[in-house]
Image (cartoon, coloured by chain):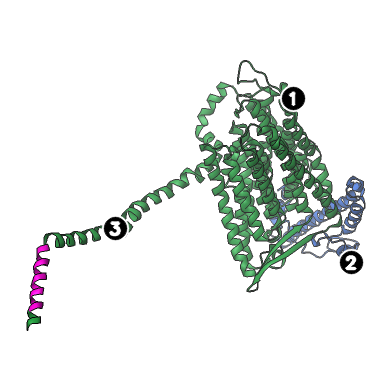
Amino acid sequence: MGQIMGSYNARNVDLYMDDKPTFNPQDGFSFERKQREMIARDEDLISARIPPSKRDYCAHHLLEYQVCRYKNMPMLYRCAHEKHNYLNCEHQDYVLRMKEFERERRLRLRENRLVGVA
Amino acid sequence: MKKISNFFFSFFFCFIFSMINFFFFVYFIMENMTFFLEWEIISFNSMSIVMSILLDWMSLLFMMFVLMISSSVIYYSKSYMSSELNLNRFIILVLLFVFSMILLIISPNMISIFLGWDGLGLVSYCLVIYYQNIKSYNAGMLTALSNRIGDVMILMVISWMMNYGSWNYIFFLNFMNNDYMMKIIGFLLIVAAMTKSAQIPFSSWLPAAMAAPTPVSSLVHSSTLVTAGVYLLIRFNLMLVDMFFLKILLLLSGLTMFMAGISANYEFDLKKIIALSTLSQLGLMMSILSMGMPDLAFYHLLTHAMFKALLFMCAGVIIHMMNDIQDIRYMGGISMYIPLTSLCMNISNLALCGIPFLAGFYSKDLILEMVSMSNLNLMIFFLYYFSTGLTMYYTIRLLFYLMVNDYNLMVLYNLYDEDYTMLKSMFMLLFMSLVVGSFLSWMIFNYPYMIYLSINMKMMVIYVMLIGLLMGYLVSNMKIYSMNKFLMTYSLSNFLSLMWFMPSLSTYSLNIYFLKMGHKLSKNVDMGWSELYSGQGMYNIIKNYSVFYNFYQMNNFKIYLFSFFFWMLIFYLMLLL
């Protein structure tokens, strides 16, 4: 429920948490947005047996963490640094998605206002 | 001497096996390895019957925990059950239980799972009726029959899986996922798991099973047997994630933890309070499992097994000390007399509440934060957090009743930590309860969870726990005036304290219909139609015929004689002519 609280108002514009962005990614930006790059290579992810659900933009940090885990098992407190890097990256990714959600909400509001519904 | 050596060998075997499993677990998780061993027994009509064993980090770790707790419980039983007549039988039953559990854990095959599953049911029945009295027999029957529903479901899964040509379910999980038939198998499995893990509406057997000896409760009905259902669903989780019934399970398990939490607050039996708390934690495991996070469910399963087994052991020591009295209203101030047991009791209780940095904290806090992170409605959120508050509530109430309030049993008393054998085994689990949370959180999470919450959401657990703490303190100090006031809410209290009338639902209220139907059948069929057409009716017909013949024979004998002579005369005349 926790995260749903922040997204509750978005239901006014029929926007839910699992919806994908619908507007042009450049709308409202004065500069050109670059597409995000996947740093980790597919071969590395496959060879490290990372499950498909974890192969996101932070997977390169996850690979580093996995390597550290392998080297230091079972003294895994030594991998705190790598783990923190990975979680930090995931956090940034999460913030980015939240910003994208908010952008979608505002653009929908704007669209409604322009056509005179809101 | 012979009895003691049996205990020692069993303890030694379990402990060494547990350690071996631990080393293999570390190796397997490091190398991300899985062993799948298969022996073909027979193959006919494109249907192969194989004996298979699956060894991966999950099965090895669970085996390690089961054996560790078993070894501890066996060591404890050496003292706890010392006055028992048939000690060998007790040990054999416990070892049979451990064997069934291991069979269940390492099986990727429905047939061998069923053997383990049914073995658990049977041995747990034998252990529940161990003290042979009416109460135990009733409790055992309730336990066995509730679990029997699950056994039937597994049997139906086995018969359905014959269509696929193999009972190795592990091969079907991924690529048969869209098959409609697999949904039916999933449904049957969920119901089976609900019976074993005592979810609503099958909850009533778990508190009843407390009729078993306390070491058995510690091993069987808190840490291992009841988690078999959770473990089964963890194994099948890949197949179940998209099922609608899993959402029903989320609601039912949420309600189970809520119901158990409330009932524990009304309970005065020491063992039943702990049993209801087990039920509450099982609900937590099931609900996080049905949200699609099996690793968290498994994590909580393991940490919970440790501190709950310890909690039961402490309860056993207290019950021994109190001359076999289990009512917490008689207890009080025991921390002054048995400080070491009280230490174990307090630590396991606080671990249950999720006090940082004990075992329960790592798993419970992670679960609750993942609940906060997920996209769920207010009701599920309420059930989770309210139940967490209730856990603190009944734990603090229990602690105050046991440790702080006055001792009420006798005027003159002499209480002390009587047995160091029991204490030693408890300290083994105490050590595990302290370290296992952080240790496992390092080891088993290959892929850590990112949690990002606002401060109040993050602190929500602390808030509900503080409220629970306050309420528990107030309730434990309740005097006669407030008790009397409670009579005003008698119907509600009755409803809540009797687990929402669930024991009645699965015993009296269900039985009565079958008994009535049986009565009618007996009247109309057994004593009615079937009697008319077979027993009594046939008797009447044969009797009447025989009376008739009798009459014919006895009273009309002269007619025979006359006709005999008559025919003889005719015969003679014919010969002459």
Read off the residue under disc 2. A43
Q: What amino acid is found at the position of numbered circle 1 in the picture? A: Pro
**Residue B463 x %, y %:** 73, 36
Separation of residues labelled 1 and 2 (CA atoms): 59 Å
What is chain A's hue in the picture? blue
- Which is more toward the observer, B156 or B537? B537
Q: Main SS of the magenta segment? A: helix
10 Å neighbourhood of mark 2: few (<14), some, or many (≥20)?
few
10 Å neighbourhood of mark 1: few (<14), some, or many (≥20)?
some
Tell which residue pokes out farthest to the top in this image.
B412
Q: Which type of secondary structure does the marked residue at label 1 adopt?
A: helix
Q: Which type of secondary structure does the marked residue at label 3 adopt?
A: helix
Q: What amino acid is found at the position of numbered circle 2 in the picture? A: Glu
**Residue B483 x %, y %:** 55, 25
Q: Quadrant of residue B385?
A: top right
Residue extent of the magenta highlight: B557-572
Residue beneath the point at 68% across and 45% down: B95
Residue B464 visible? The answer is: no
Q: Which type of secondary structure does the marked residue at label 2 adopt?
A: helix
Give left or right: position of B561 versus B491: left
Q: What amino acid is found at the position of numbered circle 3 in the picture? A: Leu
In the rendered view, tell whether residue B51 sits above or below residue B393.
below
Question: What is the number of the mark on residue B532?
Answer: 3
- Which is more toward the observer, B190 or A116? B190
10 Å neighbourhood of mark 3: few (<14), some, or many (≥20)?
some
Task: Tell me which chain the residue with mark 1 is part of.
Answer: B
Query: Quadrant location of the N terminus of chain B?
Result: top right
Residue B198 belongs to the span the image colors magenta = no
Residue beneath the point at 63% across and 49% down: B120
What is chain B's hue in the picture? green
